[in-house]
Structures are given as structure tokens and as C-alpha cells.
Amino acid sequence: MTMPSTEQMAALLEAATSARERAYAPYSHFAVGAALLGTDGKTYTGCNVENASYGLTLCAERAAVVAAVAAGCRSFVALALVADTGMEKIVTPCGACRQVLAEFAPGLTVVCANIGGQSATYRLGDLLPHRFDLE
Ligand code: THU
């Protein structure tokens, strides 16, 4: 299992913070940014994209996965997630995003941060034990 370096994690958090600035969240006003480090060394970003039909909202993490897969990358080392709850609280990926991330990278390192710079690091397998898997 590849572990991201401190420098890679810092760069990934920066990329997620920039992606968050492009979030389209006129309904919840809760902007989220995500950045995935591919095993190809490239970074793929995503932000949440909401819709007037609320249930169609796409989370930042899944947007990053879609961007990576469309660019030809299907394996990942780490994910950085950045949001701002207005408190010290740090958010982790929602259940649907955990399942989608696990499809491609069950051993993923997940770093969750708020814009104040506080962060927490998890293993995707700890966030989602016993993912649904047909294999
Ligand atoms: N959101 C994400 O982008 N990622 C998550 O893991 C959970 C929630 C977004 C969806 C919605 O636009 C806003 O946060 C509030 O739920």
C-alpha cells in the first residue's frame, strides 16, 4: 500500500482548497473541495455541484473520482477533502462517496481538513468496513 509523503499531502490539501472555491452550492451554501492523488502521480480535483432538484447534487469526492476515471486514472494513493463547518469540526466523506472511492482504492489514505487548517487522517477501510463488493 503506497503512503503519500508529507509534501504530497500538503499539495493535495492545497488542490482541494482551490477546488472548493469553485464549488457550486447555492442551496446549502456548504462548499466542499476534494483532490485525489493518482498512482500516476497526477492530481484530480472535484467540488460539489448542487442542483435545483436537490437530490441530483454531486459530492466533491465523487466529482474527483469521475474526473480521474475520465482522464484514464483508476487507482489512487490519497484523497484530501476540505470543507468549512464554521466550527472546529472536520467533515468526513459521506457514505455514498466512501462506497464509490472503495471501488477504486480500498486502501486509500483520506485526509479531511477544515479551512482553519485542522485535519484528521483516516484509512478508507476504517471509514467503510465491509463495503459492498461483488467479487
Ligand atoms: N457534500 C460533499 O460534497 N461531500 C460529502 O461527502 C458530503 C456532502 C456536499 C453535498 C452538498 O452540496 C453539501 O455538501 C451539503 O450536503
Image: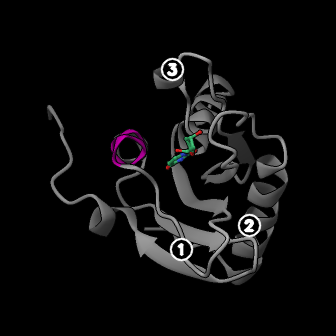
Indicate which disc residue 13 carries: 2
Residue 126 tag number: none
Quadrant observed for ligand 1 in the rendered image = top right
Q: Position of residue 22 (x, y in %)?
A: 83, 41
Mark 1, Cα crowd under 10 Å, few <14 / some 14-19 / many 20+, is few
Judge whether residue 93 is colored magenta: no
Q: Residues within 10 Å of mark 2 (few under 14, many from 20)?
A: many
The numbered disc on residue 3 is: 1
Q: Amino acid at mark 3?
A: Leu
Q: Magenta stretch: dominant SS? A: helix
Q: Position of residue 49 (x, y in %)?
A: 66, 30
Residue 34: give x, y in percent of width and height. 66, 51
| Of pointers 2 and 1, the one earlier in the residue sequence | 1
- Residue 78 located left or right of residue 97: right
Q: From the image, tell me which residue sits under label 3.
A: 56
Q: Quadrant of the C terminus?
A: top left
Span highlighted in magenta in the image:
95-100
Q: CA distance from mark 2 to mark 1?
A: 15 Å
